[in-house]
């Protein structure tokens, strides 16, 4: 029997038991290990929506996950029982024009187990998934690190889209999980001057520990003044801004702060349409780039962690047992005790 929480409506998450479905030839059965909670899980749980998607229950929960292979479909040759894997929660069709042109994250079937999460999600005792979207973890990468591959892959995809390279000057707005992982990704790609902003001083402390060259307490209501402060602290206007908050004034600041011909990456998803100084962006050729999930980023993320180039572990601030999922949601929502990443054990 499988057990997993199912979202039936706003703030209505119930544990249910269901049989484990039969395996397709190219699928594996995973005994789930660790699942991290994400802002999108919170948005669905407490607001019933995510971006412009309005929840249609029942929904599963969780998409930042690691597990152990317990059974392989008849055609699976790349994995065997006992292999520890990070789950890339997607199921692109491989046939549409986007898949065929190398943009499987924009597959027309939109079959991502993340936005929204189908039922069941990765937060479950067992999860059936296609083998080619399960990535084997090296011996020195833990199951907790494995569960952080998913959000880290988002940050890597954003930095690759922004063409962050040796010497790039980078502004990261927001020091939540995605902001901190964006900091690590930018650093790993060679950015030498990175400023991280947040409204919470304790998060800036974490950003400094994780390698930020500069930090700045945000919170001013005037985005142009905020941009000026950023330039003063960095000694230049950043070429790339990774906007990880989805908050209007932060996004406005991001546009004003980014130097001409630079780029603002939408890493954080705003929950409503924002009023942005788009003329200012247009006249200075500041590109605003969307970021949707990741594209062939899992192997890079795993390698960066395995080779010791980045350390993602400081992100994990709180750990919960499988049956404490309600408590984990509450902790994460309230930011209790400086909660950054709440990790739930399924094993
Ligand atoms: Zn997520
Ligand atoms: Zn497709």
Image (cartoon, rainbow, N blue to C red):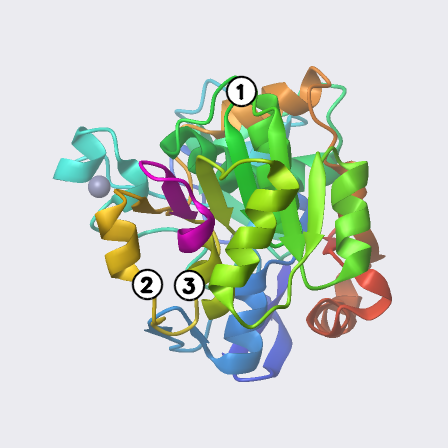
Q: Earlier in the sequence, mark 3 or mark 1?
A: 3
Q: Is disc 3 in contact with disc 2, using a CB cutoff of under 8 Å?
A: no
Q: CA distance from mark 3 to mark 2?
A: 30 Å
> Residue 296: x percent and y percent?
41, 28
Q: Quadrant of residue 86?
A: top right
Q: What residue is shown with label 1?
A: 167
Q: Is residue 240 magenta?
A: no
Q: CA distance from mark 3 to mark 1?
A: 37 Å
Q: Earlier in the sequence, mark 3 or mark 2?
A: 3
- Range drawn in magenta: 255-265
Front in this rendered view, residue 17 or 91? 91
Label for residue 332? none
Q: Quadrant of residue 260?
A: top left
> Residue 13: x percent and y percent?
61, 78
The residue under the point 39% across, 33% down is 162
Q: Is residue 215 above or below residue 191?
A: below
The residue under the point 25% across, 42% down is 285
Q: Is disc 3 in contact with disc 1, using a CB cutoff of under 8 Å?
A: no
In the picture, measured across the screen, residue 340 lies left or right of residue 257, that is right
Label for residue 277? 2
- Considering the numbered disc 2 on the image, is that residue within a helix, a strand or a loop? loop
Label for residue 116? 3
Q: Nearer the viewer, mark 3 or mark 1?
A: 1
Q: Is residue 212 above or below residue 121?
A: above
């Amino acid at each position: 029997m499988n057990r997993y929480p199912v979202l039936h409506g706003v703030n209505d998450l119930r544990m249910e038991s269901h049989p484990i479905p039969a395996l397709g030839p190219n699928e594996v059965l995973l005994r789930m290990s660790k699942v991290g909670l994400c802002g999108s899980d919170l948005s669905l749980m407490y607001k019933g929506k995510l971006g412009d998607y309005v929840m249609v229950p029942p929904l599963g929960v969780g998409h930042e996950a690691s597990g152990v292979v317990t059974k392989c479909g008849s055609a699976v040759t790349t994995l065997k029982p006992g292999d520890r894997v990070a789950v890339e929660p997607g199921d692109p069709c491989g046939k549409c024009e986007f898949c065929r042109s190398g943009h499987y994250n924009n597959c027309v079937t939109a079959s991502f187990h993340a936005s929204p999460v189908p039922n069941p999600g990765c937060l479950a005792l067992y999860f059936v998934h296609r083998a080619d979207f399960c990535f084997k973890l090296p011996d020195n990468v833990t199951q907790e690190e494995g569960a952080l591959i998913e959000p880290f892959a988002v940050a890597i995809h954003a930095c690759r889209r922004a063409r962050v390279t040796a010497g790039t000057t980078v502004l990261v707005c927001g020091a939540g999980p995605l902001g901190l992982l964006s900091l690590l990704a930018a650093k790993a790609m060679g950015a030498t001057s990175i400023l991280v902003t947040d409204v919470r001083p304790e998060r800036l402390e974490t950003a400094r520990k994780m390698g930020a060259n500069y930090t700045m307490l945000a919170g001013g209501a005037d985005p142009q003044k905020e941009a000026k402060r950023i330039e003063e602290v960095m000694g230049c206007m950043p070429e790339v801004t990774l906007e990880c908050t989805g908050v209007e004034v932060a996004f406005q600041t991001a546009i004003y702060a980014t130097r001409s011909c630079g780029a603002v990456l939408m890493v954080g998803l705003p929950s409503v349409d924002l009023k942005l100084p788009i003329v200012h962006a247009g006249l200075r050729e500041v590109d605003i780039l969307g970021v949707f999930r990741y594209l062939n980023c899992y192997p890079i993320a795993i390698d960066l962690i395995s080779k010791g180039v980045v350390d993602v572990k400081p992100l994990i601030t709180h750990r919960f047992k499988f049956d404490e999922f309600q408590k984990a949601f509450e902790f994460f929502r309230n930011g209790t005790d400086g909660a950054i990443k709440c990790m739930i054990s399924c094993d």
